[in-house]
Amino acid sequence: MDELNQVDRKLDRMLLDYIDRNRDRLIEHVRQMVRIDSVEREALDGAPFGPGVKKALELALSISREMGFETVNLDGYMGYASYGRGEDYVCAMGHVDVVPAGEGWREPPFSGYMKDGVIYGRGVLDNKGPIMACLYGLAAVRALCLPLRHPVRIIFGCDEETGFKDLDYYLSKEKPPVYGFTPDCKYPVVYSERGRAVVRIIGTRECLGTFFDFVNKYFIGAGNTGDRLGIDYYHEEYGMMEMRGYRLGLEPGGKAGRGNVSHGNIGAENMVSFDATLSYPGGITILEIMKPITEKAESCGLRAELVRNYDPVVFAKDTPMIKAMQDSYQRVTGMDGTPVTTTGGTYAKAMPGIVPFGPSFPGQKGISHNPNEWMTVEDLVTNAKIYALALYRLAQL
């Protein structure tokens, strides 16, 4: 056993040394990715999410090929780099699309500006830096010619920020992984992700008073736990129900709701709607949540409908996949790797077999989606080391 542990430690050291030797290349490749404005825009031929996203995907695949990987481009929806042979693969799944830059930047948001060991730019943390760190982690495994039980894919998503249409397309063409993670959340490894749903309240323009009274009473003028609706569920590990992301669907010209849907005999031109995003803890079902909302809406002559739902993602803490990632994190950082839960929403909600894992370390909050988004060089390198160990361990399960 001691000899086996010594071999494992030696392999780990060799993987980490590869990352150290190639840190400058990793930094430059991340900065190249950040320099591309890959906010989703109008679809074009061969660019379902716009030209910027297409350019970012093509660069990621080009870098992958330069590093010796085979690549696949799934019609601009997603792409991946792969290493190893076999049907049942493991993966790291990130994304190259970004949210709009917004205002308040000290330097241009797509410049890849670096100062004092920190890279600034839209998407450097969410999610171009982390997915490139995964690519370099796999490059370390490839460089050592280590035998794998499962092939490994680094998957570059293109629509994570606006709807997961990329993942729908991927799963129409490819089977899901047996194990994997998305580097788009936090450390330590997340064993469970809360559910997320969008609920819509629908009324008519003739009853605007009733409609707005309801919305104000149960949403705008209430706390965000859903207590007035009777859905203020709590779980010891997940925390409280959260309501957020409110959106009024009353537009000039009588249009209401995303896509101007009609409901029953209510025409779109006569409809008003209000959407709320619910982040709900594990241990309850969406049916339990919708029941009191529907009853209260109908008692006021309104309707409630479920627009979208992703059930909570739950893995046992002691599964081999979770333990492999926990061990990788602890070996590189020396910090406690006890698995945690998250309120966020990632690809793990819709891609079977994966969980969130990194890239933000404990205490790092409020960086993504904000002006002057940043990632330190040391964090980038540390992520690559964690992912090198994790991908190798997952590929051996």
Image: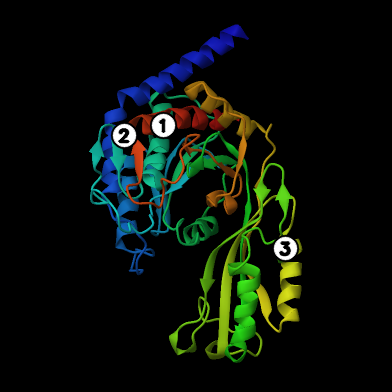
**Callout 2: helix, strand or loop?**
helix
- Which residue is the extreme one toward the top? 2
**Numbered disc in front, either 3 or 2:** 3
Number of numbered markers: 3
Determine whether, in the image, residue 365 is placed left or right of residue 176.
left
Q: Position of residue 230 (x, y in %)?
A: 74, 63
* Amino acid, disc 1: Ala
Residue beneath the point at 51% across and 36% down: 151
In the rendered view, would you say 118 is above or below 71?
above
Circle 1 residues within 10 Å: few <14, some 14–19, many ≥20 = many
Circle 3 residues within 10 Å: few <14, some 14–19, many ≥20 = many
Q: Where is residue 169 in the image (x, y as percent from the top left)?
A: 50, 60
Residue contact at pointers 3 and 2, CB within 8 angstroms: no
Q: Name the residue under label 2.
A: 26
Q: Is residue 91 visible?
A: no
Determine whether, in the image, residue 317 is placed left or right of residue 12.
right
**Closer to the camera, 36 or 59?**
36
Q: Reading the chain from its start, which is encountered first: label 3 or label 2?
A: 2
Q: Name the residue under label 1.
A: 384
Residue contact at pointers 2 and 1, CB within 8 angstroms: yes
Q: Name the residue under label 3.
A: 289
* Amino acid, disc 2: Leu
**Callout 3: helix, strand or loop?**
helix
Q: Distance between the residues labelled 3 and 1?
A: 40 Å
